[in-house]
Amino acid sequence: MPASKSARARSARGGSRSGRSGAGRAATAGRSGAGGTARGPRGGGGGNQAQPQAARDGGSGRGSARLQLVPEATDAAAASQGPPLWFQLTTLALALGGLGVSIYETYAHFTGSHLAGCTGTGTEDCTKVITSPQSMVFGVIPVAILGLAFYAFVVAIMTPWAWRMRRREVAWLRLAAMIVGMGFVLYLVYAELFQIGSICLYCTSVHAITFVLFVMTVFAAATWGLAPGRRPG
């Protein structure tokens, strides 16, 4: 009997220790589970942190694209405005100079007056040139009158207002007028050198002005296009 009681007591103490060990393992497992749960949201937070980073990267890409588009838009805007104001005013000043010389030559042609500054010696003889048979087109129309009419038209199409017009026809008229004018200048230079045998300083100045205007008009058409300020339909 005493031995049996001792065995039961040891068995009870062993069961108690086993119960406490099981409870400890359960508590440990509970803490581990709670830690895993707690770590789970933190891991998810890392994923959430990656999303703003991706958003920032995407925003940076869009910003770079916008920066690349800005110079292109600036160039397009500059091209749409056509030649700058100084260019327009330069062509107008040259056209006014050509008109002034043409008026003076027309006056001298009809009055027979001597042109100021012309010596009439050697190959330089303005009076001989403006009164020669070659100074009349078809023997009827004085070249001086044609020059006057031409430069009156050129002054009109070289004004800043005309440069900024959004009609392609105006640009084509400007270009065509300068091409025709340059062709006529070549004919007059040939007539002076090979038919009349004399040159006129005033005529030469008009020829030079016409050549410069021709170059500037062609340059404007090649750089800014014809009617650059025209809005697309």
Image: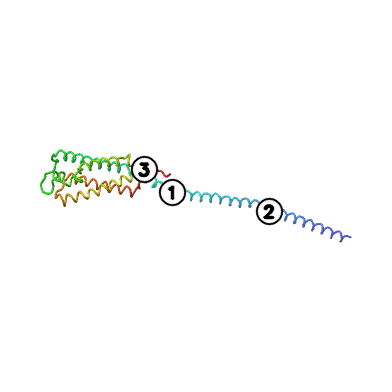
- Amino acid carrying label 2: it is Gly
Q: Which quadrant of the structure image shows residue 90?
A: top left
Which label sits on residue 33?
A: 2
Which label sits on residue 69?
A: 1
Would residue 69 be seen by someone viewing this image from the given angle? Answer: yes
10 Å crowding of disc 3: few (<14), some (14-19), many (20+) = some
Give the Cα distance between marks 1 and 3.
28 Å
Give the x, y percent position of residue 154: 27, 42
Left or right position of 195 against 70: left
- Amino acid carrying label 3: it is Arg
Of badges 1 and 3, nearer the viewer stands 3
Please, what secondary structure does the residue beneath circle 3 have? Answer: loop
Chain-order first, disc 1 or disc 2:
2
* Quadrant in which the N terminus appears: bottom right
* Quadrant in which the C terminus appears: top left
Residue indicated by mark 3: 167
Give the x, y percent position of residue 191: 18, 50
Chain-order first, disc 3 or disc 2:
2
* Depth order, front residue of 182/97: 182
Q: Which residue sits at x=82%, y=59%?
A: 11
Chain-order first, disc 1 or disc 3:
1
Left or right position of 68 against 215: right
Residue farthest toward the left in the current orientation of the protein: 121
Q: Which residue sits at x=61%, y=51%?
A: 44
